[in-house]
Image (cartoon, helix red, strand yellow):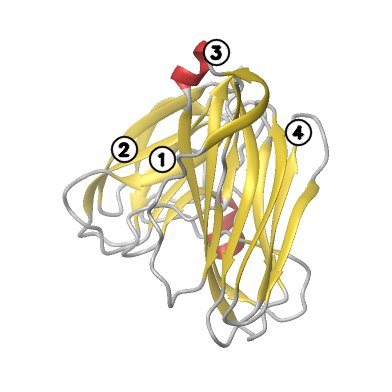
Amino acid sequence: MKKMIIVALFCLFPVFGWAQTVPTQIEMIDGLDEADPRLGRMEYVEIFGQNLDVDTGTDPEDAWFDSVYVWLDASGAILRASSSVSTDTATIKVTGLSTAGNIVSENFSVTGVTPDTGAVTFWRVNSVENTSSTATTGNIAIYEATADTTTGIPNNSSNIKGYIAAGQEKSHHGFYTVPVDYDAAYIDFIEIQSASTTAECEIWVRPSGGIWKNILSVDTAAGAVTTSGRFYKLDGNTDVLVKIKEVGGDNAQVNVRVGLWLYVK
C-alpha cells in the first residue's frame, strides 16, 4: 500500500485563532510504501507568516513581518540575538540549515539590548522561538554578527534574518527551506476569511539553483472557506515562500500557517 504525506496550509485573518490540529491522514505518495523505513523518520513542521499591511490590488506581498527575507549568503553567517528593550531576559532558539543544507539549531541568551553572539554558521533561518518560561515585551531580532548595531536591533531591516514581534514569542516568517536530507510533499491549502475581507494566498517555491515558481493560488470570497489541493514534491534545499495579494480591505493584516510533512530521501 503506497503512502502520501499530507500538507496543510491555513491563511487566517486576526479574527480567528490558530487551528492546532496536525494532519494525520497518510496515503498515496509515489515510491513510498507502507513498509518503507523512511516513514519512521517523518517530521511535521509548521511555517507561520504575518504581514501587517497588505494593500488592495498590489503584486503579491510576502507573508513576512516587515517584508524582510531570511536567507543568508551562500557562505553562511554567525548570528547574534538581542531585544529592542533592556528588560527582556529569555532563551531564544534559532533553527535553520547549515551551508551543507543540514538542520542546525542554537540557543541564544538574550539579556536586554546587549547582543549575544553565537558560534554556529547558518545558511538559512527557518524559525525563531522563545523557549524560556518568561515572556518577552520587546521585539527580538536575529541578525548577522557584522550587522549595524552594538545594542538593541539593527537599524537596517535587511540585516535581520529572524524576528519575533513583541508579544508573539515565535517568528512569523512565511518562509522555509527543506533540509537536504529530506523531501516534502505538498497537497492541501485551506484559506479562511473574515466576514469583510477577501484575499488570494499563493505558495511559491524555488528549487536549489532554480527560479521562483508559483505552484498554487487560491481565491476565497468574504466569509467563505475554500479548500484546494495539489501534490507537489519538494526536493531538499527547496525554498518555500508564502505570498498574499488582492485583499478586499486595504491595509489589512494577514496571518498564515503552513504545515509540511518531511520524509527522508
Q: Which residue is mark 4?
A: 207
Instruction: Of the two numbered discs 2 and 4 on the same chain, state the one appearing first in sequence.
Output: 2
- Mark 4: which amino acid? Pro
User: Which is more toward the observer, 24 or 237?
Assistant: 24
- Mark 2: which amino acid? Phe
Instruction: Of the two numbered discs 1 and 3 on the same chain, state the one appearing first in sequence.
Output: 3
1 vs 3, front mark: 3
Q: Which residue is mark 3?
A: 36
Q: Position of residue 186 (x, y in %)?
A: 64, 41
4 vs 1, front mark: 4
Instruction: Of the two numbered discs 3 and 4 on the same chain, state the one appearing first in sequence.
Output: 3
- Mark 1: which amino acid? Arg
**Secondary-structure class at tag 3:** loop
Q: Residues within 10 Å of mark 4 (few under 14, many from 20)?
A: some
Instruction: Of the two numbered discs 2 and 3 on the same chain, state the one appearing first in sequence.
Output: 3
Q: Residues within 10 Å of mark 2 (few under 14, many from 20)?
A: many
Q: Which residue is mark 1?
A: 80
Q: Quadrant of the C terminus?
A: top right
Dividing the picture into quadrants, the one containing residue 84 is bottom left
Q: Is residue 59 left or right of residue 100?
A: right
2 vs 4, front mark: 4
Residue contact between numbered discs 1 and 2, judged by CB atoms under 8 Å: yes
Residue contact between numbered discs 3 and 4, judged by CB atoms under 8 Å: no
Residue at the image position 52 percent from the left and 16 percent from the top:
38
